Amino acid sequence: MPAPLPVLYAHPFSSYCQKVLTALYENGTPFTYRNLEDAGASSELAALWPMKRFPVLVDGDHTVLEASCIIEHLDLHYPGPTRLVPADAKAALEVRMMDRFFDNYISTPQQKVVADSLRPAAVRDAYGTAEARAMLDTAYAWLDQRMADRIWAAGNRFTLADCAAAPFLFYADWTHAIDAGFRNVHAYRARLLARPSFARAVDEARPYRSYFPLGAPDRD
Ligand SMILES: N[C@@H](CCC(=O)N[C@@H](CS)C(=O)NCC(=O)O)C(=O)O
């Protein structure tokens, strides 16, 4: 009997889920998609992970938390043509460093601005959101220099770091526009949007654009 497929608890509009979906689509990895829109999926997620954050991957006896760790798990157990974490330890370190950059300095401040907009007006955090926007500007500036001489985040190959960059830069630009002067960042964001694996994740999320709390712009 064939082994059961890994099950991904995810929502198509979620940036962290798109990060994992991009990895799955990159290698054509078969999986069961437990869409959190479906009946019962949210309570299954809550039983697996009390933080109720997503994505979560269930693979046999393993429940794997955190998008980066899910991609590492996929790379280890379901390797495909795109090696998402290089076998060479030094190259892998660079990939993980860039993955941390996109999580901590693009996604985290982007989520802060969006989450603040969902708070009741009386408890909004103007100081915190100003800090988050300033962090995004600093991150865009750093990334613009970083991308001056490379195609993908860690060099010439598409990796875990690009799976992170794709949805995070996508939503970051919607949330706090990337200055037009950061041409390398814009070009990189466009390259990511043209990558078939991420383009598929973006297409699958189109029906949910009304969920974007700040109002989705009429563009990718
Ligand atoms: N550190 C987690 C972050 C996951 C995360 O923040 N997911 C968001 C969706 S993009 C979520 O679960 N939001 C629901 C909530 O905050 O309750 C990861 O890397 O997977």
Image: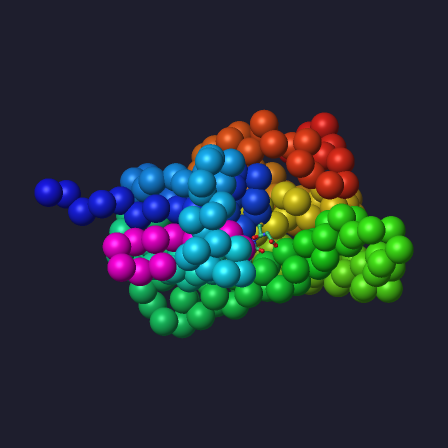
Is 67 on the left-hand or right-hand side of 7?
A: right
Is 55 on the left-hand or right-hand side of 125?
A: left
Q: Is residue 164 above or below residue 86?
A: above
For image coordinates 77% across by 61% down, the residue present is: 132
Residue 54 part of the magenta-drawn span: yes
Asked if one can make out residue 160 in the rendered structure from this viewpoint, the answer is no
For image coordinates 57% across by 39% down, the residue present is: 13
Asked if one can make out residue 51 in the rendered structure from this viewpoint, the answer is yes
Q: Which residues are magenta?
A: 53-63
Residue in front for this viewpoint, 179 or 41: 41
Residue 18 part of the magenta-drawn span: no
Q: Quadrant location of ligand 1?
A: bottom right
* Residue 140 position in % (x across, y down): 71, 56
Is 100 on the left-hand or right-hand side of 60?
A: right
* Residue 61 position in % (x across, y down): 27, 59
Residue in front for this viewpoint, 67 or 117: 117
For image coordinates 73% across by 41% down, the residue present is: 213
